[in-house]
Image (cartoon, helix red, strand yellow):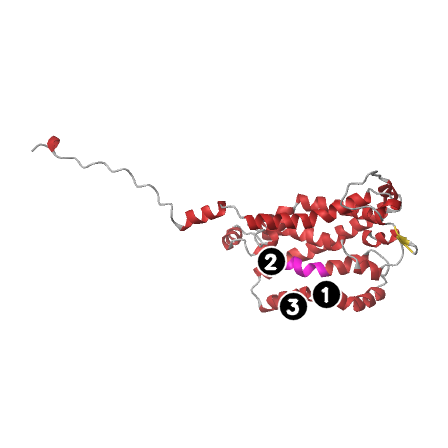
Amino acid sequence: MSHDTLPRRPVRAPKPPVTSGPAHRRRHWTRRPNPLAGLGSVIWLAVVIIPIYAMITTSLTSQDKALGHNALKPPTDPTLENYDIVLHSGFGHLLTNTVTVAAAVVAIVLVLCVPLAYVAVRSRGFWSSAAFRLFLLGVAIPAQAVVVPLYLMIAKLDLYDSLLAIILPTAAFAMPVSVLVLTGTMRDISEELYEAMALDGASPTRMLFQLVIPVTKGGISTVVIYSALQAWNGFLFPLIFTQSDGPRVLTLGLFNYVSEFGVNIPALLASVVLSGIPIFAVYLVARRALVGGLMGVGGK
């Protein structure tokens, strides 16, 4: 029998890929709508948006109509008089002081915490590990518990009623969390990258500036926003450690609209709106880096 007359086996079509595995089920699950999550998101959005909307509408209402005004309704006769009052009552001075305090706190935290976190991650010594754990005890110490010793220290250093009296304690209380975030992001850096730079003859300082800092931009952005928020929203230290109008910041400036005979609620809320715009803009710019750094993946 010749080869031409041999029966040929039928050509089988390739089997379709199996789509019932875990990966397919996981992918299908992620595409499935989640009504409960959507409802929770809407409720949370309403919780956040409604107070902001009420604050803005009240700030656009005149003072004589503020008490009888429904904050959830748009003002019938909106006015910018309250914003004019705020801008002509020393708001620029308060804003300048607050920006100065926030910038100084961020600078101090970055200069001290980045090298400290780098040493804590790269050093394997007992003393460095013990110092790192001791340093993180600051997370568990509330500012209210040490305000009296801080007041005595600032008075002894002749720093009372100055911006340094606000900057130094605020930076100190922002450092523990900042170190914790930075160490988490720096541990994501692969050991092979350090070894490759070491083979090229790089010193630890060069590794810090050419490898660690560029790779951990997410964690550094998180620390910048966190420390800036601590300085911007701080109230206890400005209240205790300052007295005159010279070093007054925005949080204390709100008392300008509280008098013996009443409270100018629309002007107070207008001041809150204006003071929240700068830090909200910073958050919008770096919100992804902030979330990534807090999740511990900022270095990736």
Mark 1 secondary-structure assignment: loop
Q: Which amino acid does label 2 sit on?
A: Thr
Residue 102 is a magenta residue: no
Return the x and y of residue 63 as percentages of the image width and height.
87, 46
Residue at the disc numbered 2: 183
Return the x and y of residue 38 as percentages of the image width and height.
58, 47
Return the mark for residue 134.
3
Return the mark for residue 44.
none
Residue at the disc numbered 1: 142
Q: Earlier in the sequence, mark 2 or mark 1?
A: 1
Q: Which of marks 2 and 3 is nearer the N terminus?
A: 3
Looking at the rendered image, the quarter that the N terminus falls into is: top left
* Front position in the image: 163 or 12: 12
Q: Which amino acid does label 3 sit on?
A: Leu
Residue 182 is a magenta residue: yes
Residue at 49% over, 46% down: 32
Q: Which of marks 1 and 3 is in front?
A: 1
* Front position in the image: 281 or 31: 31
Mark 1, Cα crowd under 10 Å, few <14 / some 14-19 / many 20+, is few
Chain part drawn in magenta: 173-183
In this picture, residue 237 sits left or right of residue 203: right
Mark 2–mark 3 Cα distance, whole angstroms, equals 15 Å
Mark 2–mark 1 Cα distance, whole angstroms, equals 22 Å
Q: Which amino acid does label 1 sit on?
A: Pro
